[in-house]
Amino acid sequence: MLSLVFYLFFGINVFAFTGVSSIQQYLSIVERLSHVFCLDQQQIRRKEDVTFEQVGINLTKASFSWGFKKNAADVTNEDQPVLTGLNLAMGPADFLVVVGKIGAGKTSLLFSLMDETFKTAGDSEIHGKLAYVEQEPLIISASIKQNVAFGLKFDDEKFERAFRLSHLLSDLENFSNGADTVIGERGINISGG
C-alpha cells in the first residue's frame, strides 16, 4: 500500500511540475503570437497593374529600416536604418547583379523592394509585379507539373511558355515521362544544375 501511495505521489508531483512549466511556456508563446497578429499589415508600395513599358524600379535617396512596428509612423530616427540613401533606376529590360560581403545589405535590398521593411526616408516607386526565388529550390516529391503549378490549377500554355523561356524544354524531353515524371525527395533524381 505504501509503495502504491509513493508511486501516486511521485506521478502527481512530476505532472504538476511539468504541467505548470508547460502552461508558462504556452502563455509566453500566446503572448508573442498575439503581438505579431495584432501588427498592422504592411502597406504595399508598388503599383502592379501597369503595362510592360511602365515596369520599373525608382529609388531616390531611399532609406529602409527593419523592425516590428505598429505602422510606419512608429518608426523613429532612433531606429537604425539598414539601408540609407539608395538611388536606383531600372526599366523592364535592365539586368542587375548585386554582390557584396556578408552583412552588406543584399538581402535587405531585396526585402525592401518586396515591402518587407519600412521606408524611413526618400522616394520609392515600384511599378510591376515582383517575384523572389530562393537560392535553394523548394522541390516537393511529385510530378514536374505539380512542382510548377504548386497547388494552383495547371495551365498547359503557361507551363510550355515557362519551360521555353527558361530553356528547359530539351531537359523535359530527356525525362521518360516528360512533365509527368515524378521528382524524388529533395529532387534526388534531377540534376543539381
Image (cartoon, grey):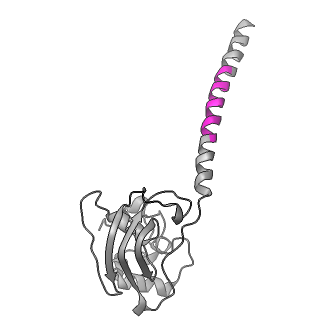
Residue sitting farthest toward the top: 2
Range drawn in magenta: 13-27
The answer to which image quadrant residue 123 occupies is bottom left
Q: Nearer the viewer, residue 147 or 40?
A: 40
Asked if the magenta segment contains residue 26, the reply would be: yes
Q: In x, y percent, where is residue 68?
A: 51, 57
The answer to which image quadrant residue 60 occupies is bottom left
The residue positioned 38% from the left and 61% from the top of the image is: 81
Position of 103 compared to 139: left or right?
left
Q: In x, y percent, where is residue 61?
A: 34, 74
| Vertical relation: 127 (above or below) 137 | below
Q: In x, y percent, where is residue 79?
A: 43, 57
Q: Nearer the viewer, residue 41 or 24?
A: 41
The residue positioned 25% from the left and 67% from the top of the image is: 99
Asked if the magenta segment contains residue 117, the reply would be: no
- Whether residue 159 is visible here, answered yes or no, is yes
- Give the main secondary structure of the magenta stretch: helix
